[in-house]
Image (cartoon, rainbow, N blue to C red):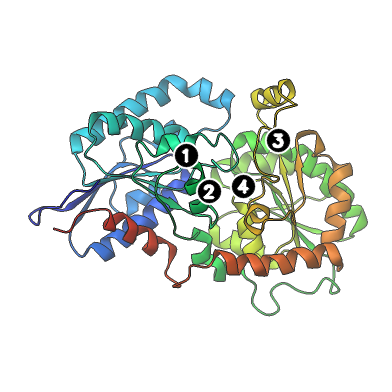
């Protein structure tokens, strides 16, 4: 499905992002589209501050729809449903040359399905694959009805969609490829473990629900580690909207972490750290790119935990790990802890091994070098440039 762009008007791109990570991807894509198209480009749709800086006036604030977990979604459901219909109406009225939905499938795919029904001539690109390789694989085939091209951030996803009957899928690289140099320490920046107390990163997540579920156990774990490593330095990068809440929660920790704000300071913390205790998510790839061994934790929303208990004889995921480096490497090199496994008694021995020279630490560091090779794009093209080219290639030449 494609459509020509008349020479007497701008290329019109309707973008739909659902949260901050999508806003970052969207802004980089917008910048690359403006460079590669070679003519005027008009942007419409839904995004955040970064996309606004590139020329998008969002239909509404991202905070209206950027929620995670069933309980949070139910509380905001009337607003989310209203915003879905508002976005669909705006997209159909704009009649863009292409629509790009970015991550947040619970919102963006509901928009795409409705746009496809009402305006089937509009090409639709999905930027970031839902985790069909882990959860509900039947979504891949359903997506092929309303997604014309899928841009994947993980190297195994094109084959997964081919196997599952999904839409045509292309690996465009992960955004962290473009900022890998910012995450890797310069000589002397990450001092040897033999030269004083180690530095531990604590990353309880970027959503309030994650912080609420994990921070208490993380604090108890840090307390025990501080006894084993006198002088232990703890750095806690926090997203701005949770910084005050986190600072209040960690004020009572025996070893008070330094709360780190801002992307540059976060990258600096990664370059200094020797190990990390982190919530599950894309941060595991950032840590791997920085060469920081890690233990990864995840606690399910209460509803999904109950579903897991009721259906304990049925696997809720079709992969052996939920840690992205493990999935990409094809082996479980990074230890992970789910729900009741997230306890200081389980975490402390693992982190002691990662904060000391030895096989546990060396195995992860070596594996991360292999991961770097797997994720690199063959032609060395920047990730956003590869994504923009695939969006423009979907359109017929003028």
Front: mark 2 or 3 = 2
Kindly indicate the quadrant of the structure image that contains residue 37: bottom left
Kindly indicate the quadrant of the structure image that contains residue 28: bottom left
Q: Which residue is mark 2?
A: 160
Count of numbered labels shown in the rendering:
4
Front: mark 4 or 1 = 1
Picture disc at residue 304: none
Mark 2 to mark 3: distance in Å?
26 Å
Q: Which residue is mark 1?
A: 140
Q: Earlier in the sequence, mark 4 or mark 3?
A: 4
Q: Earlier in the sequence, mark 2 or mark 4?
A: 2
x and y percentages locating residue 334 in the rendered image:
74, 54
Q: Which residue is mark 3?
A: 299
Whether 27 is drawn above or below 101: the answer is below
Q: Helix or strand or loop: what does disc 3 sit on?
A: loop
Residue at x 66% of width, y 43% of height: 319
Left or right, residue 132 beside residue 394: right
Q: Which residue is mark 4?
A: 281
Quadrant location of the C terminus? bottom left
């Amino acid at each position: 499905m494609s459509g020509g762009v008349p020479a007497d008007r701008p290329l019109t791109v309707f973008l739909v992002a659902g949260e901050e990570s999508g806003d970052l991807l969207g802004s980089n894509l917008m910048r690359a589209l403006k460079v590669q198209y070679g003519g005027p480009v008009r942007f419409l749709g839904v995004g955040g501050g970064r996309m606004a800086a590139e020329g998008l006036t969002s239909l509404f604030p991202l905070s209206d729809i950027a929620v995670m977990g069933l309980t949070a979604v139910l509380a905001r459901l009337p607003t989310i449903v209203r915003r879905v219909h508002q976005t669909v109406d705006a997209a159909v009225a704009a009649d863009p040359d292409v629509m790009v939905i970015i991550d947040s499938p619970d919102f963006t795919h509901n928009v795409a399905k409705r746009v496809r029904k009402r305006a089937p001539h509009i090409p639709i690109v999905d930027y970031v694959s839902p985790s069909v390789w882990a959860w509900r694989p039947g979504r891949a085939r359903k997506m092929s009805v309303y997604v014309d091209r899928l841009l994947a951030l993980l190297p195994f996803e094109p084959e997964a969609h081919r196997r599952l009957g999904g839409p045509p899928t292309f690996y465009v690289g992960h955004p962290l490829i473009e900022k890998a140099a910012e995450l890797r320490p310069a000589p002397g920046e990450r001092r040897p473990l033999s030269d004083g107390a180690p530095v531990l990163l604590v990353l309880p997540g970027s959503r309030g629900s994650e912080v609420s579920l994990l921070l208490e156990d993380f604090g108890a774990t840090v307390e025990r580690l501080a006894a084993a490593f006198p002088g232990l330095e703890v750095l806690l990068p926090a997203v701005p909207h949770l910084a005050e809440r986190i600072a209040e929660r960690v004020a009572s920790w025996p070893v008070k972490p330094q709360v780190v704000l801002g992307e540059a300071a976060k990258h600096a913390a990664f370059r200094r750290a020797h190990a990390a205790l982190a919530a599950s998510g894309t941060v595991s790839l950032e840590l791997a790119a920085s060469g920081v061994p890690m233990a990864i934790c995840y606690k399910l929303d209460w509803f999904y935990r109950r579903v897991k208990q009721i259906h304990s004889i049925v696997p809720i995921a079709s992969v052996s790990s939920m840690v992205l480096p493990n999935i990409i490497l094809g082996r479980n090199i990074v230890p992970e802890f789910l729900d009741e496994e997230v306890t200081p008694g389980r975490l402390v021995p693992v982190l002691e091994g990662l904060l000391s020279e030895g096989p546990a630490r060396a195995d992860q560091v070596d594996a991360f070098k292999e991961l770097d090779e797997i994720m690199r794009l063959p032609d060395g093209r920047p990730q956003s440039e590869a994504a923009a080219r695939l969006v423009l290639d979907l359109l017929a030449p003028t």
